[in-house]
Image (cartoon, rainbow, N blue to C red):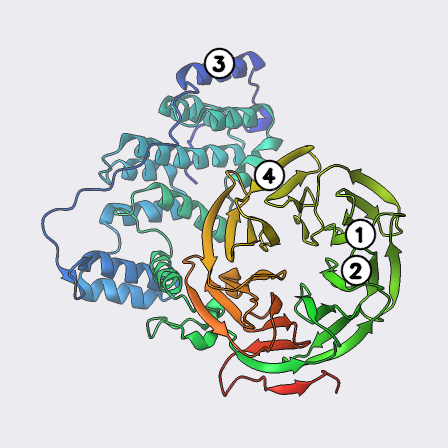
Amino acid sequence: MGGVENSEPPLKRVKVSLGDLKNLVDEVSRIVPVSSSLGDLMARPLCSQGAEETVGMKGVIKKQEFVKIITRALYSLGYVRTGALLEEESGIRLHSTAVALLLDQVQGEKWEESLVTLHKIGLSDEITVKRASFLLLEQKFFDLLKEENLMAALDTLRNEIVPLSVNVGRVRELASCIICPSQCMALRISSQDGTDANSRSRFKEKLEKLLPAAVMIPERRLEHLVEQALDVQRDACVFHNTLDSEFSLYVDHQCGRNQIPSHTLQILQAHKDEVWFLQFSHNGKYLASASRDHITVVWEVKESDLVLLKHTLTGHQQPVLTITWSPDDSQLLTCGVEEVVRRWDVNTGECLHVYEKAGVGLISCGWFPDGKGIVSGMKDKSICLWDLDGRELECWKGQRTLNISDMAITDDGKRIISICRENAILLLDREAKFERLIEEKQVITSFSLSEDNKFLLVNLMNEELHLWSIEGDIKVVAHYRGHRRMRFLIRSCFGGFEQAYIASGSEDSQVYIWHRDTGKLLLTLPGHSGAVNCVSWNPMDPRMLASASDDRTIRIWGLDDLNYKGHCSNGNGIT
C-alpha cells in the first residue's frame, strides 16, 4: 500500500534511540521556521487559453465549465453511468488525464506514484504543490507505521516531509508518533483518514479543496450555485415569510403581500378593560394577555390555529403591566403596576409564589435562562435577583431602572437589559461587573430584544423606532417611522420568518408592519377601534400575529387566503 520495500525487521524489533528522535525534532524546527505560515497564500488557477464557447442569453457562462459542473453533480448524486455518458457525448472530460490518474492512485493508496503524477498536472503554484505533497506523504507515513515499518516511516518524515517546509506543527505531531505509536491513531482520525471507503473519500475531498477549482471542481458546486441563486431571490423578496422548504426551482421566487398576516382570524373578548400587554409563549402554543382590569388571561393555540381561553388569572390589586414566559413555557410571571410579581403554573392556573419587597413596589420582571431564578425592576430604581422561593440573591442599587416595565435577559444569563434613564438603556454584564449604555436623544418608552440577542428594538417618544446592534460596536442600524404615539405606551416586536419584520401598535388603532432590513413600511392593519398598545408575533408560526387594544379586544391576524385553515370568529375563545 505504497510502503517502502526493504528487509528491515518489524517495529517491535527495531530500536531507535531517543537521541536520534530529539535530533529529528530539532531538525524539523530548523528547516521549517514557524513564521512560514501558508494560511494567507492561495493557489493560482490555470490560465485559460483563448476565447471559449458560452451558453445562456447573456453569454457569460462558459460551456466547458457548465458541462463539467453538471457532470460533477451527476457523479455526486450517484449517477455514474449518466455522468460518464455526458463526458463521452459532450467530449468534455471532467478531469484531465493526469488528474484522473492521480485520483485513481489515491484511491488505490499508491502514494509514490501519486506524488509523481501530482507534479505532472502542471500546477503553477509551488506552495500548492508542496501542501498537496504533504497530504500524500502524510498518508504514506501513516501506512508505514501501520505496517510497523518504523525505519521507513522515519526516513519518509526526515527526507520527504520535513524538506517541504510545510505545517511545522503537524510535522512535530508526526514525529511524536514514532516516540509514542499510540498517538498515531488519534492523529490519523483527526486528519479524517482511515481504511474504509468513506474515510478515503474524505481524504479525497481534502485534496480537492486544496487544488485549484479549474483543476478539480469542488464537491457539490452545482448545489452551491443554486443555493446562492435562491438566497439572492429570497433576500430580494420583501414579503418572504415562508419556510425555505417551500422554494421551487421551476420558477423565480417572489412572495406576495398575502404572505404577511393581515387578515383578522379571531377577535378575542375576555377582558373588561383596556388590554395593555400580550406575548406568545416560546413554543407558540400559548398566548398570555394582561389588562387594566387586573386580570391576566392565558389562551391556548390549537393545531387549527384557533385560539381558545385556557385560564383567567386573578390576584393582582393593580393593572397588570407585563408578562414573561419561563424558558420551558410551563410557568408565567405577571407584574402589577408598582405592586408584586406573581408566578403561575400554566397547566393548572395556580399561583405558585408572590414576590414582593416591603415598602418597594415591583415594576418589571424576567426569567433567567435556567428557569431557576427571576429578576425584577424595583420602584426604588434597583434591580433584584430572586430564587424561585423568593430569597433575594443579588441586588444592584442606584439608577438601574425607571418606572417602565421593560426588562430583558440574554439567553446566556450574562446581561440584564433595562431602561435606566429617560433616554438611556442599561446593558448590565453580571459576570464582568461591567455596564454599557445605549443613549438616545429622545425619551425611550419601551424596547424589545431580538431572538438571537444581537439587536434591540427601541420605541421613542418622537414616533420613531430605532434598531440597535448591541454586539461589539453598539450602533443604530435601522429606523422605522409611520405609526402614531402621542400619550400612551406603545410596544413593538420582531417577527415573521427569521424575524425579518418589525410590527408595532399605534394610537391610530392600526397595526404597522415594516421590512426589518430596508425599513420600508409594508402594511397597516385596520380593525381595532382604540389604540393598539402591544403586538406579538408567534415565534413558531410566522403567519400568526396578535394585537392588544384599548377597545378591550385581542385580534389574531393570519393570511388573507381562502385556503388558509384559519377562519374569522368573534367571541371570548371559550368552546
The residue labelled by disc 3 is: 26
- Residue drawn at 59 percent across, 82 percent down: 265
The residue labelled by disc 4 is: 437
In the image, 451 versus 40, the foreground residue is: 451
Q: Separation of disc 2 and disc 4 at Cα?
A: 27 Å
- Residue drawn at 40 percent across, 66 percent down: 238
Q: Residues within 10 Å of mark 1 (few under 14, many from 20)?
A: many
Circle 4: residue type: Leu
Q: Separation of disc 1 and disc 3 at Cα?
A: 68 Å
Q: Judge left or right: residue 290 versus residue 85.
A: right
Q: Separation of disc 2 and disc 3 at Cα?
A: 72 Å
Q: Judge left or right: residue 112 versus residue 430.
A: left
4 or 1: tag closer to the N-terminus:
1
Q: Are circles 1 and 2 on residues that touch, CB within 8 Å?
A: yes
In the image, 498 versus 123, the foreground residue is: 498
Q: Judge left or right: residue 220 versus residue 414.
A: left
* Nearer the camera: disc 3 or disc 4: 4
- Residue 31 at x, y percent in the picture: 40, 16
1 or 2: tag closer to the N-terminus:
2
Q: Are circles 4 and 1 on residues that touch, CB within 8 Å?
A: no
The residue labelled by disc 1 is: 362
Q: Separation of disc 3 and disc 4 at Cα?
A: 53 Å
Compared with 120, 51 (above or below) is: below
Q: Residue furthest left?
A: 50
Q: Residues within 10 Å of mark 3 (few under 14, many from 20)?
A: few
Circle 3: residue type: Asp
- Residue drawn at 40 percent across, 75 percent down: 256
Circle 1: residue type: Leu
Circle 2: residue type: Gly
Q: How many marks?
A: 4
